[in-house]
Amino acid sequence: VAVELSPLVRRVVANNPSAYTYQGTCTYLIGRGDLAVVDPGPSDEAHMRALLAAVRRDERITQIFVTHTHTDHASAARTLQAKTGGEICGFGPRLRTEQPAVTMPFDRELRDGEVVAGRTWTLEAVHTPGHASDHICYALKEEGVLCTGDHVMGWATTVVPPPDGRLADYLASLEKLLLRAGDNHYLPGHGPAISDPHRLVRAFLTHRRERNEQILSAVGEGTATVPDLVRRIYDENRKTVWPAAAASVYAHLLYLLETGRIDLVGDDVVQRSSRFRRRA
Ligand SMILES: [Zn+2]
């Protein structure tokens, strides 16, 4: 079911709830008459029906924007295009060679700062790598709203899975949002709208810096591996999130390695199974 969030924004939540997607992926319909979609969502017939039902008879979807190519955000893009003819837009050309989750040559590749406008809406691409190297937030100029995808969500901090996810990029992308004035509300890819968003962004920065220090001191107690650190830092009772926790710890270790605060033990090349030691 579509919910009207503001004069220009409607939201349809896909039925794909999980430990990683909260209640499901949020698909946003933006504008009046000629519409932009931000994140078509997962491949799911019921979601597609709900999305198309939210488009009124005198309206049509002209653009389909993708925040990043993870399946829960981008899988439905081709189907939606087949039904509406909308142009698929996303970040490009890709920065890294890893396979994206959804292989998708975009009809239109957007770079940081690029603006696309319809008759009633203007969206600016804000490149925000970290969760994924191709991640874009979209700023709706008319309403002071930023669609934040998986970069900033209200219900949980995002996952930064290496190698495509990179903590140094993520921290820089959070700082980048703090420099932007006029984004009064965030509309995330999962979970409810966020007001007073800079406060949340600062809290995420603090959380990551504290986690860096926590991991650094844990590594300081002896050589450590990713599983050692996950066991030491994360709650026994929330083992469902341990795979994500392992990716996160690894991302922090790579960051500490890049910034010269820890060393690799034994291996020549860093990998998930590597052992680390605090630099003296
Ligand atoms: Zn994602």
Image (spheres, grey):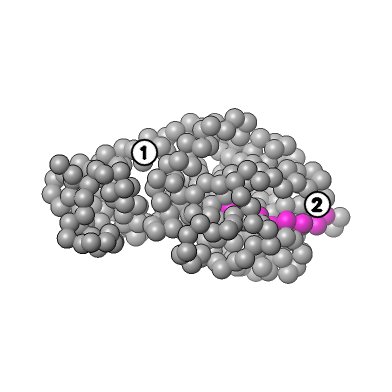
Residue ID for mark 1: 207
Crowd class of label 2 (few under 14; some 14 to 19; many from 20; radius 10 Å): some
Q: Position of residue 62 (x, y in %)?
A: 77, 56
Residue shown at 34%/60% (left/top)?
A: 243
Some atom of ligand 1 lies within 8 Å of the CB belonging to the residue at label 1: no
Dot 1: few (<14), some (14–19), or many (≥20) neighbours within 10 Å? Answer: few
Q: Which of the pair 242/167 is nearer the observer?
A: 167
Q: Would you identify the image quadrant in which residue 119 lies?
A: top right
Q: Residue at x 17, y 56 (%)?
A: 265
Three-letter code for the amino acid on which mark 2 is drawn: Asp
Image quarter hosting the C terminus? top left
Label 2, secondary structure: give it: strand
Q: Is residue 85 magenta?
A: no
Residue 135 in the image, given as x and y percentages of width and height: 54, 52
SS at mark 1 in the image: helix
Task: Tell me the residue that label 2 is attached to.
Answer: 34
In the orientation shown, which residue stands out farthest toward the left?
A: 222
Residue 155 in view here? yes
| Percent position of residue 144, x then y | 66, 35
Question: Which residue shows up at 51% across the image and 65% down it?
Answer: 101
Main SS class of the magenta portion in the image: strand
Task: Confirm or reject: label 2 Cβ below 8 Å from ligand 1.
Answer: no
* Residues at marks 1 and 2 touching, judged by CB atoms closer than 8 Å: no
User: Magenta span covers which residues?
Assistant: 59-67
Residue 277 picture location, percent across and down: 17, 50
- Mark toward the start of the polypeptide (1 vs 2): 2
Quadrant into which the N terminus falls: bottom right
Total count of labels:
2
